[in-house]
């Protein structure tokens, strides 16, 4: 399959759904909603929503309607975007540029940016729970919320960001680096794949396979992110290149060197495709996505 | 009934439940969880959880087990606490004191405080959705999540805080002040009452009554908050008194004067008790809570 075309077409699908669901007529709250929309529509690969949709299609063997899963996919992107807005704040990574555009606080100021993040965070759970959106059965929906809340919370994404921020400039053991990567980036990627599967009625065994796939893809993604931060220019990345080294962040290239890091990323992709053994051609989009993770340049 | 004893006993119940549910063995994330616990256990009236529990008992005529509703009650307190941590940040209200103690960022720094808020925010939805907690039927649980996410999000609490922050120092019309109060404070108070009712299987008509009660109590609470900011000392409040006037915030006393504000608060309490007409003696705790709102001194 043509991964580039697939990604482009899926990105369009997600962006249209995001646009439809983003509180168009917010009355007195429309300025606030604009600050949320700014970051939500400032580019981005839409990787988590695309993984979610692909997992749902694979498990249902193409039978599930995209419309049923799109609110979950959009919620994942809202959570991812909120985390980027907060990560970029002066008190955190203090980044002025994200995806080639000024960061949220650079445009609206810190207070509004904190609230844009908070608004997107909460709105994700509105999308996941509100009967206006989607038509996944209540039990599956509740389980999806539990999976995403656990992955994005203090034992997942937020906890990982805490460890990342508080360990900046320190030499840390590999075990801690792995925890940071798994929690900060990996947990939400795994939750994206798993929640798509649950929406489509995945069995317990299938949920384990999706979790294995998600963990491996998340690891590959993070290693490649670390490599790109070393090898790319700021223009290619749309954000500051070389910033990890400048901040003394622990990364795969810093710990293992570039060559070993690249072979570790390739191993993780192999593990991801292996986890989908037995799904046949239905798994081709998820396999192609795993391969794309290490071919990407931004 | 003895409201003071009732409040004391209920506060204990909520704090024990919060303590039980707060991720005791968080391993590598325990420092982060400590920053969440610091603000969660820094005092507070626990008004939202107490309203939630009281509504559930009223609707079920005392039949529902507290244990079933406590995860919802705790989730409401997590959301309230996260909003206080973020409101206190230097970029927002820049408060160093809350409930007589240093604010979260004064203790842990800004980055950790932003993440303590994010962690509590997300953990609230974990408590609401995770099968480990409580035993409310899935449909009711999903509806509770929808109610709370809508109330706490961009069209509710977060949106209200945005309007509050961005209108500081400006003369604003009463209509906008009302929107700010309803969204920033009122929405989550109403959601607390309503979610307790839904947990106990409230009918549509009962849900309307609980919403009317919550809206009126929320209004009374906010007017009294404005009055206390004028009339109390910082020591009594445990936070900076007179800060609203110093910041040029629109408040009820600023718009209507103290006497008129007090009679408006009393009217709101009358409306709250009126909304519970027909519930008989089961409604006595909620009625006493409404009366307490305007008698409180902190």
Image (spheres, coloured by chain):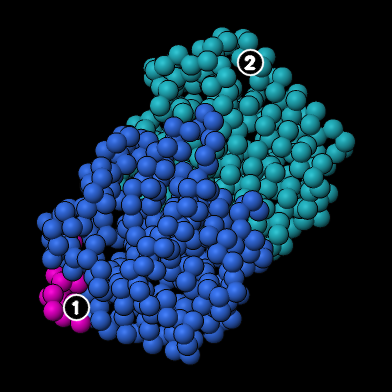
Chain colours: A blue, B cyan
| Foreground pick, A112 / A55 | A55
In the displayed structure, would residue A269 be above or below residue A184?
below
Indicate the position of residue B196 as horizontal and vertical percent values. Answer: 70, 48
Q: Quadrant of residue B214?
A: top right
- Residue at image position (81%, 47%) is B203
Considering the numbered disc 2 on the image, is that residue within a helix, a strand or a loop? Answer: helix
Indicate the position of residue A63 as horizontal and vertical percent values. Answer: 60, 74
Examine the structure image and report whether residue A69 is included in the region drawn in magenta. Answer: no
**Which residue is labeled 2 in the image?**
B262
Considering the numbered disc 1 on the image, is that residue within a helix, a strand or a loop? Answer: helix
**Image quarter in which the N terminus of chain B is found:** top right
Q: Quadrant of residue A32?
A: top left
**Which residue is labeled 1 in the image?**
A262
Kindly identify which chain the residue marked by label 1 belongs to: A
Q: Is residue A290 left or right of residue B244?
A: left
- Residue at image position (76%, 53%) is B200
Mark 2 surroundings: few (<14), some (14-19) or many (≥20) residues within 10 A = some
Magenta residues, as a range?
A249-263
Whole-angstrom CA distance, mark 1 to mark 2, is 68 Å
Indicate the position of residue B261 as horizontal and vertical percent values. Answer: 61, 14
Q: Is residue B41 left or right of residue A128?
A: left
Which of the two marks, 1 or 2, is nearer to us in this view? 1
**Image quarter in which the C terminus of chain B is found:** top right
- Residue at image position (39%, 56%) is A80
Give the total of numbered labels.
Answer: 2
Q: Can I make out residue A6 in this image?
A: yes
- Residue at image position (53%, 72%) is A56
| Foreground pick, B289 / B93 | B93
Examine the structure image and report whether residue A258 is included in the region drawn in magenta. Answer: yes
Q: Can I make out residue B59 in this image?
A: no
In the displayed structure, would residue A38 be above or below residue B170?
below
Mark 1 surroundings: few (<14), some (14-19) or many (≥20) residues within 10 A = some
């Amino acid at each position: 399959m043509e991964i580039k075309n697939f990604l482009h077409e899926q990105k369009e699908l997600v962006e249209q759904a995001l646009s439809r669901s983003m509180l168009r007529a917010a009355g007195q709250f429309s300025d606030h909603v604009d600050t949320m929309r700014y970051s939500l529509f400032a580019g981005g690969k839409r990787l988590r929503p695309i993984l979610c949709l692909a997992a749902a299609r694979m498990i249902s063997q193409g039978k599930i309607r995209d419309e049923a899963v799109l609110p979950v996919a959009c919620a994942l992107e809202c959570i991812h975007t909120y985390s980027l807005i907060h990560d970029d704040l002066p008190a955190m990574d203090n980044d002025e540029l994200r995806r080639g555009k000024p960061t949220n606080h650079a445009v609206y100021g810190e207070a509004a940016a904190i609230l844009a993040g908070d608004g997107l965070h909460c709105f994700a759970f509105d999308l996941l729970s509100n009967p206006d959106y989607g038509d996944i059965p209540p039990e599956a929906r509740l389980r999806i919320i539990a999976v995403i809340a656990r992955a994005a919370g203090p034992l997942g994404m937020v906890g990982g960001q805490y460890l990342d921020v508080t360990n900046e400039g320190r030499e840390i053991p590999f075990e801690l680096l792995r925890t940071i990567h798994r929690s900060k980036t990996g947990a939400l990627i795994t939750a994206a794949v798993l929640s798509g599967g649950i929406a489509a009625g995945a069995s317990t065994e299938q949920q384990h396979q999706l979790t294995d796939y998600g963990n491996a893809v998340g690891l590959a993604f993070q290693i490649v992110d670390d490599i790109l931060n070393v090898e790319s220019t700021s223009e290619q990345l749309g954000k500051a290149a070389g910033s990890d080294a400048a901040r003394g962040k622990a990364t795969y290239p810093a710990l293992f060197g570039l060559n070993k890091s690249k072979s570790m990323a390739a191993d993780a992709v192999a593990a991801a495709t292996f986890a989908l053994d037995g799904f046949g051609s239905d798994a081709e989009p998820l396999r192609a996505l795993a391969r794309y993770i290490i071919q990407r340049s931004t």
